[in-house]
Amino acid sequence: MSDLFHTATPFNPSPLAAELRPETLDDVIGQESIVAEGSILRRRIAAGRLGSIILYGPPGLGKTSIARAVGNTLGKSFRPLNATRAGVADIRKIADEARMRPTLIFVDEVQRFSATQADDLLALCEEGIVDFIGATTGNPYHVLTPALVSRSTILKLEPLTIEEMEQVLQRAISHLRSSGITLKILPEQIRVIAGRSGGDARRALTTLEGLAVGHPRGQVVNITQDMLDEAYASAPVNHDRSGDAHYDIVSAFVKSMRGSDPDATLYWLARLIHGGEDPRYIARRIMIHASEDVGLADNTALQTAVAAAQAVEKIGYPEAKIILAHAALHVARAPKSASACRGISLALENVTSKPPIPVPLYLRDTHYKGAASLGHVGYKFPHDDPRGWVAQDYAPDILKGDFYQSDAREAATFEKRADEYWERVTQSPQQRRSWRK
């Protein structure tokens, strides 16, 4: 949608990130899997049949830049739409223009499109009237309508590496120099800016621009450590607690605990804490994995996790970080057993997929008069035996070994000691999980 305010020349200079926006795909730094020769995007462009594309990834990775570069490469009019303001009438107006000149419609934050808007736009794409690129920071499979997902090619952008970020910054330094601003900045300072950007090129360029502006034109700007410290004193934390970054970091955290890597556990925990994650949420994740991944190998892991969850209810940050580290490291360092998690999952699968098994008469309730007359007799009380155990079937033989299988390994875990104890008592081997190489 175009009006007086969209077409007027802006009073303020463009941000550095906008000035450095690449004109072609060859100018794009990073995202090799998307922009490289032979990629699906390049092949679509070469065939002149772009269709519907969804670019997906965190902010500052170049989604808008790639979309504009595609428009330039195709030689098509680039028409951005605001997903919250544009209506079906605006889309159809652009479609009328597209019948007279080739047009690429770009919608940032396309997840804000209604189903009606998306359907109308997709119909135009399928008729070949326009090409369409949508951008979103959310996972398309979670935030977009099924129709838009099924009819689009989804391309995921990854955060830029430190080396790629350094290329972006060097390009920016050269651009500033050509406009009369010369920065004297050390390679290690460039690397700090690159590293602290979190793969977000816009953030890195904004930081560099903040260091460069406000100095007399023509004067060499000497970047000092104090200037860098000031730039990052109130820098925002790059952690979206509702997006993919959140779930990816949580996934890395719990997988590091499961994998018994204490350093990785502490690193991903630190990322969550630094991102302002609720300590109660982190404690809940630790509790889950104390049973899911440690389980019977070390029953005290769950006790530690529960104690940590109770403690962080009373103790907030910054001290809560120590309690969370204590519990997370217990889970990471403990021997592992998945027998509890696996066993209940198999039992539930059986219950939901097969006919119910009747309760044997001798296991049925006997607390009321008349139970014996109904045949509820024959139960053997284990405590009447000196071993504390009697041979007795509690479920049909068809279930024996179907659910619980010990994960006892070489370590002297609770599960290993329990296996050895019950083998002595029952004079029969315990069911263990078979390990296939």
Image (tube, rainbow, N blue to C red):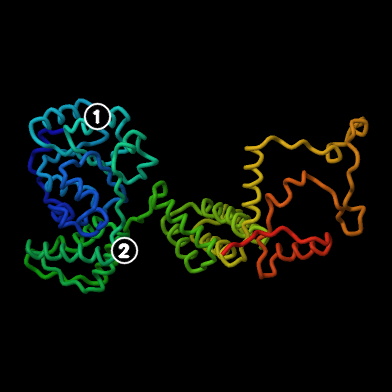
Quadrant in the picture for residue 421:
bottom right
Local crowd at mark 1 within 10 Å, few (<14), some, or many (≥20)?
Answer: few
Q: Is residue 429 above or below residue 410?
A: above
Could you tell me the amino acid type at mark 1?
Answer: Ala
Which residue is disc 1 drawn over?
A: 123
Distance from Cα at disc 1 to Cα at disc 2: 43 Å
The label on residue 82 is none
Disc with the residue nearer the chain's start (1 vs 2)? 1
Q: Position of residue 88 (x, y in %)?
A: 23, 27
Query: For numbered disc 1, what is the local secondary structure?
Result: helix
The C terminus - image quarter: bottom right
Quadrant in the picture for residue 387:
bottom right
Could you tell me the amino acid type at mark 2?
Answer: Arg
Local crowd at mark 2 within 10 Å, few (<14), some, or many (≥20)?
Answer: some
* Left-right relation of 321 to 211: right
User: Residue at the spot x=54%, y=53% of the render?
Assistant: 285
The N terminus - image quarter: top left
Which residue is disc 2 drawn over?
A: 196
User: Residue at the spot x=12%, y=52% of the render?
Assistant: 23
* Left-right relation of 429 to 228: right
User: Residue at the spot x=18%, y=60% of the render?
Assistant: 209
Q: Position of residue 324 (x, y in %)?
A: 54, 60
